Amino acid sequence: MSDPLHTPLCEKLGIEYPIVAFTHCKDVAVAVINAGGFAVLGEAMHTPDHIAGDIKWIRDRVGGKPFGIDLVLPSAAPEEKTVDELMAMIPAEQRAFERSIMKKYDVPAPKEAPDLYTWGGLDQKRALNQLEVVFDERVPVFASGLGSPAFILDRAHQLGMQVWGLVGKPRQARKQVEAGVDVIIAQGYDAAGHTGNIGTFSIVPQVVDIARGTKTSVIAAGGVTTGRHLAAALALGADGVWTGSLWLASRESDLNQPLKERLIEAETEDAVFSDCISGYTMRTTRSPWHDEWMSPEAPPVLKPPLQMMLSSDYIQASLDYQRKDLMTEAAGQGIHYVTSMKPAKKILSDLVEEALDVFDRFADSDD
C-alpha cells in the first residue's frame, strides 16, 4: 500500500509527516521541524520585538524548512487599553475573592510582572502589532488560535503566506472555508486551551465534509497524543493532526521541572474545562484556583480579558516559587499518555511508528 502518512498536508508544507506540534517553546519547534514534522510557535504572550527574535532564531536552525506562528485575534477584546486601565476595570467583589484565594493557599506575590501583560488577547492593538511582525517577516504559516483570520487573507496570500484557522464549531469552519483559509484546525472538546464543547470525533468529520471539494485542508485537534489518535484522525478524513499537550514534558520544553512532573502525573480527569482562567472556556489542569472558582461562594467569572488579568498573579507566583501544589497548565484529555520526559524527536518517531503499525494491521487483515 502507498504511504498512509503522506497526505496532502505533507505536499502543501513540504514535510515528511502530517504532524503539527503547537508549542510555546522554540527549542521544541526546531526539534520537531528537523525530525520531519511541522511546528507552530505560540507567540501571543510576547512583544513584537521578542517575536521577531524568535522567528530569526528558528530560521537560523531549520535550514529553510517552513514553520508557523500562532497569535490570537480576539474581536471581543477592547480596541486599546493599558494594563492599568484593564486592572481598574476588575470589580471589587472578584478582586476580593482573588485575594482570599491567595491568602488561603499562602500564595506570595509574583517576583515579576506576569507574561500576560504582553498577551495579544488584552486588546486589539496589541494583537495587530504582533501580527505586523508576522507579515514583515513573511512567516510561511500564520495560525489564528482565537478569532477568525479571514480579514487578513488577501494580504497574507499576496506575501506568499498560508493562513490557518482554529475552529470549535462547524459554522465557524464554514465561514472560514468560504473565505479561503488554507487550513482549518478542527478542534474538539478534548483539546487543551481555549476550546469549544463538541467532541473531536464529532467535529472533525463535519469539518471534513464542509471542506470537501475546496482547497482547504483539515487538521484534527483535541486529545491527540498517540499514533492511534493519528491513524484515527486520518480515517476521519483529516490530512494531519495538531498536537499540543504531547510536547509539554519533552526534554526540550522550557517548562519548569515541577510543572513537567505535574503534567506527567496528571490523568484525563485532571484536565478540566472551565472559564475561571481566562473568561473563555479553556481546558487546563485542575488547581486550587479552579476548586475555589467552582465553589458556591465564588462570584461570577469575569468576561475576557479581565478574568485573565485576575488569574495572572496566582499563575505567575506558582511558577516563580515552583509551587507544584498550585500549578496549572493548558492540557488536553490525552494527557494520560504523557508519561515521561522524552526528546521531541523520539516523541515524533513513536507517534509515526504506532500509526504505521495500525495501518499495517488493517492491511494484514485484508490479506
Image (cartoon, helix red, strand yellow):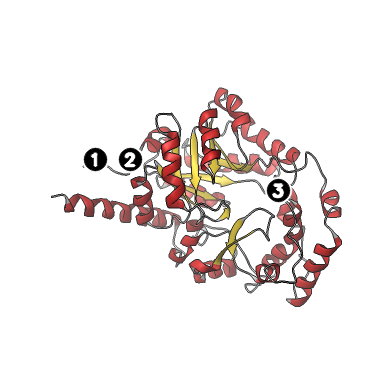
Name the foreground residue: 22 vs 196.
196
Say which amino acid is labelled 3. Answer: Trp
Q: Which residue is mark 2?
A: 6
How far is the residue under mark 2 from the one under mark 1?
Answer: 8 Å
Q: Residues within 10 Å of mark 1 (few under 14, many from 20)?
A: few
* Tag 2–tag 1 contact (CB < 8 Å): yes
Residue drawn at x 78%, y 38% is 79
Left or right: residue 322 versus residue 88 is: left
Q: Examine the image and state in which quarter residue 37 appears.
A: top left
Q: Examine the image and state in which quarter residue 77 appears.
A: top right
* Tag 2–tag 3 contact (CB < 8 Å): no
Does 112 sit above or below residue 1? below
Say which amino acid is labelled 2. Answer: His
Q: Residue furthest left?
A: 367
Name the foreground residue: 115 vs 53.
115
How far across and down, in percent of the image, does residue 51 sit? 65, 42
Of callouts 2 and 3, which one flags the residue occurring earlier in the amino acid sequence? Answer: 2
Say which amino acid is labelled 1. Answer: Ser
Left or right: residue 347 versus residue 124 is: left
How far across and down, in percent of the image, does residue 75 sit? 69, 39
How far across and down, in percent of the image, does residue 96 sit? 83, 67
Q: Which residue is mark 3?
A: 119
How far is the residue under mark 1 from the one under mark 3?
Answer: 44 Å
